Amino acid sequence: MFSLISYILRFTKFTTQPRSSHYETLRSCSGQFESLSPKLIGAISQCIPKLTFDKHKGQSGRVCVIGGSAEYTGAPYFAGISALRCGADLCTIVTSADAATPIKSYSGELIVLPDFNAVDPAKAITSCLARYHTVLIGPGLGRDPVKLQIVEKVLREIKERKLPLVIDADGLHLITQRPEIIQGYQKAILTPNAIEFDRLFTKVCNKIPNEEEPIMDVKLLAKTLQVTVVLKGSVDIVSNGAYVLVVGTETSPRRCGGQGDLLAGFLSIFSYWTHLKRTQTYDNQQKHLKLYGPTMLAAVAACAMTRECNRRAFAKCRRAMLASDMIDEIGAVFEDMFGSQTDCQI
């Protein structure tokens, strides 16, 4: 079967100036998620911790989502619940007091802390970072300048602790203003949509992105910032500045709110798993992990999951599909894509 990702990798590795006609051809080649390289899917599957009876709560991942505001309470919920449905053990939402109660009312599964209203918010948030394996910043955060100053302080501590980090939504607004605060942090993954990408690319690269060459633009931005960039769109383009992978599996034309939050939640837990696997790998069995690194494998997994959840939910609900319908598909999509990841015969 034609492997879209393998083709893109060969194309971007040996061609310095890809033509737009190639990109248009690639867009038309999207199919079922099985068109992803089986070896790449297998490499991701090996990073996922197995479900066993000898583990305790928290070992499969403790996620922290920093976001939410009075206007946007759904975004952090979607991000947190998608991480849990994907297999994270615990998820904490760090938010403001006016968002905490609504978010908590959506699900008792989420731990919700109104730390943005603490006497010293930055201290309150950073003092808890030792509890978490991975951090997601941005869903529903808002653009209040005081809040963004707090997040900037928290970012410094996240880097000191070397935690896997995903930055989405309004977190990207902060990075666009101050790209130097994330530059060089290779455990960071940025997830812009087209508009967010244009703003960030223009700020960092001092030029307007070329709409006909998005692959090279994503690679340039990632290389300049020395982070991994995921440009979300009709195909999802992932680059760490050295390599480019494209996920163009089938999705749907429905673009309801919350889909990017689901992707960010998936990405946060996959990033923990891939980083953890890298510390445990001492042989040549994980060639893909060593080649692309944990951030790119995590990004491919999250993009593929999001697109397939979207496709299945749309097949059932059509125009009425919402992000909550995609959440209902997570369990089945995960097992179909990566296997059950358990030796338990139930």
Image (cartoon, grey):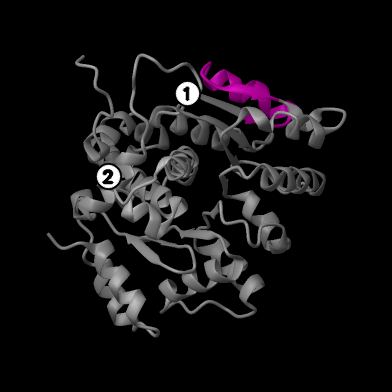
**Residue 14 figure quarter:** bottom left
Q: Which mark is residue 311?
A: 2
Badge 2 amino acid: Arg
Residue shown at 79%/43% (left/top)?
150
Q: So how many labels did they put on this image?
A: 2
Residue shown at 60%/42% (left/top)?
163
Q: Is residue 109 magenta?
A: yes
Residue shown at 43%/73% (left/top)?
214
Quadrant including the N terminus: bottom left
Graded by Cα atoms within 10 Å as few (under 14), some (14 to 19) or many (20 or more), the crowding at tag 1 reads: some
Q: Is residue 250 visible?
A: no
Whether residue 125 sits left or right of residue 110 in the image: it is right
Front in this rendered view, residue 319 or 71: 71
Q: Which mark is residue 329?
A: none
Badge 1 amino acid: Asp
Q: Is residue 151 visible?
A: yes
Query: What's the distance in space between the residues labelled 1 and 2, CA to CA?
Result: 26 Å
Whether residue 215 sits left or right of residue 198 in the image: it is left
Q: List x then y, in percent, for residue 58.
A: 51, 22
Q: Which residue is identified by label 1?
A: 89
The local secondary structure at tag 2 comes to helix
Whether residue 182 sits left or right of residue 330 in the image: it is right
Front in this rendered view, residue 159 or 35: 159
Residue shown at 39%/66% (left/top)?
244
Mark 1 and mark 2 residues within 8 Å of each other at the beta carbon:
no
Q: List x then y, in percent, for residue 222.
A: 53, 66
Dot in front, 1 or 2: 1
Front in this rendered view, residue 307 or 182: 182
Graded by Cα atoms within 10 Å as few (under 14), some (14 to 19) or many (20 or more), the crowding at tag 2 reads: many
Q: Is residue 281 magenta?
A: no
Highlighted magenta segment, given as a residue range: 93-113
Quadrant including the C terminus: top left
